[in-house]
Image: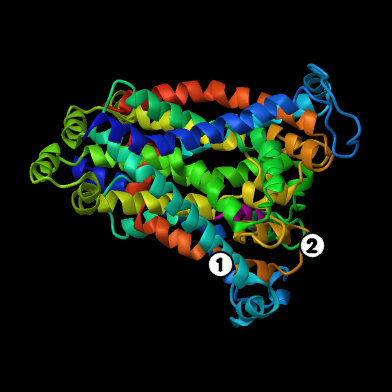
Amino acid sequence: MNPTLVRWLQAPSIILLLIWMIVPLAMTLYFSTQRFNLLYPERTGFIGLSNYKFFWTDPSFMPALLNTLVLVGSVLTITVVLGLAVSLLIDREFKGRGIARVMLISPFFIMPTVSALVWKNMLMDPNNGLFAAFSNALGFTPVQWLQDMPLFSIIVMISWQWTPFAILIFMTSLQSQDQEQMEAAELDGASFFSKFYNLTIPHLARPISIVILIQMIFHLATFAEIFVTTSGGPGVQSTNLTYLIYIQSQQAFDVGVASAGGVFAIILANIVAIFLIRAVGKTLTV
Amino acid sequence: MTDKQRIILKNRIAVTFAWIAAILFFFPIFWMVLTSFKTEGQAIAVPPQLFFEPTLENYLEIQERTNYTKFAINSLITSFGGTLLALMIAIPSAYAMAFNTGKWTKDILMWMLSTKMLPAVGVLMPIYFLAQKFNIYDTKFLLIVIYAMMNLPIVMLILFNYFREIPKEILEASRMDGTSTFNEIREVVMPLAWGGIASTALLSVILCWNEAFWSIVLTTTDASTLTAFVASFQAPEGLFWAKVSAVSTLACAPIVVFGWLAQKQLVQGLTFGAVK
């Protein structure tokens, strides 16, 4: 192919993505330095870093940042540990394995809004939910899940959706593990833990890092689950950064402050991104 | 106990736990489907009922009384539209990169991937204003464009990986015969990469179908998709559980089945080809 044609074929994707990235980013940066509230359209002008300061010193900011980190950290720990355990359990021949696999990965394909509603109503509702029924049957007072431990409840919902993702990836990766090596280790009398530590973990190192990094992108941006279940409350107990910025823009109509928050979210995501790009870049043989 | 017996016993215990895990994970879905066949009274009954006379009433009612069909069509149009648009942009580009890999190819692909790191909420206001300005707020067109751009980097990366697996000799042979580039893509590359393109499309459709930020923020009524429709049920506390379940079951069923069928490809797609 001649070089000109190659360039023409590549151009659309590169140019479109460049626009998709640069234009909104530039606008966000610009808005973040402006006095810009939809409720007071007459007040405009450059105000330097005031919006950042406002966002930064907002009493909701620290809790929201903390919630974001707790949410991401907990979900990552739960999904990776549970995902590893379950994929090791299922990594053997047995009758109905295909069905068990399908049952295990299904939650990953459920819409986030559906999953949030099912958990909020049918499982966690303190009056009519299933968990309440179990508590009553065992003689306990039903827990007010979303009222008393909102962040934990949301972590549970998200982990339910994303552990299947980890299982799916680990399961696939385990199938390519060297079986002869495992059997040799078995014959040599290696214990489960030494096999797990010395053979399985090194084999799964890359899948684990990819699972962690991809989940980070998604969980830093958690929105639907919070929107549908707690709306960030009670107070700011389940508000994360994404939701805080959403509130600034859609309820306080403060475009300037929301944009400053947006810039903050972008920086946070890009710190994660650097690691992901490195991990994926290594696997891309060009 | 002999070694063999010990291994069999160990296996049995592992399988038992695997089934327990499978049942626990699947249970909320099972419960949702079950609830969709209850009456509203049965749905909120205390204690919850496992055995009851199933009814199709909810499914009939959501077709008659809500705009379910409209939202389902919106979801279909936006996810397939977004996917198609992304593929149309990505196929020629990925093809050019895969068969004419240059010094910058890897960097370009990595840069494309890095645009995924722009969190939606970070560019919410600009997209909102641009949509208002161009009069495309709350239109399917807007969602199609956003979904296409959202998935373009992943689609590019997966297609690039697939195209690279096509032996170069086949292409060279067809070039010797004097085939034009357009015909080369259509007659040689596409048939060979068909499986890859189909599974890429599948992944993209799944991601669009379940997308729940832009569809909630950028639509009000006209272009609302099923994710936004389901989210609108959040308000009335404890009402209409059976109907919500019916809507949810209908909204999730096609994608769950899609997901089952394409497990292998999904793993490749979701890990950008790093796990096969």
Is the magenta region chiefly helix, strand or loop?
helix
Q: Amino acid at mark 2?
A: Pro
Position of residue B33 measured from the top left corner of the image (x, y, whole percent): 56, 68
The vertical placement of B222 against A221, above or below, is: below
Name the residue rendered at 55%, 32% in the picture.
A21
Callout count: 2
Q: Is residue A146 left or right of residue B117?
A: right
Asked whether residue A115 is drawn in magenta, I would say yes
Q: Nearer the viewer, mark 1 or mark 2?
A: 1
Which quadrant of the rendered structure holds the N terminus of chain A? top left
Which numbered dot is residue B73?
Answer: 1
Residue B146 visible in the displayed image: yes
Q: Residues within 10 Å of mark 2 (few under 14, many from 20)?
A: few
Q: Amino acid at mark 1?
A: Ile
Position of residue A235 measured from the top left corner of the image (x, y, whole percent): 84, 38
Out of B274 and A63, give the one closest to the viewer.
B274
User: Nearer the N terminus, badge 1 or badge 2?
Assistant: 1
Name the residue rendered at 43%, 54% in the picture.
B84
The vertical placement of B68 against B4, above or below, is: below
Circles 1 and 2 on the same chain: yes
Asked whether residue A160 is drawn in magenta, I would say no
Q: Is residue A205 left or right of residue A252?
A: left
| Residue at the limit of the structure toward the top, as seen here | A48
CA gap between label 1 and label 2 equals 25 Å
Look at mark 2 in the image and give the residue it sits on.
B236
Q: Image quarter for residue B272?
A: top left
Residue A85 visible in the displayed image: no
Q: Which residues are magenta?
A: A110-117
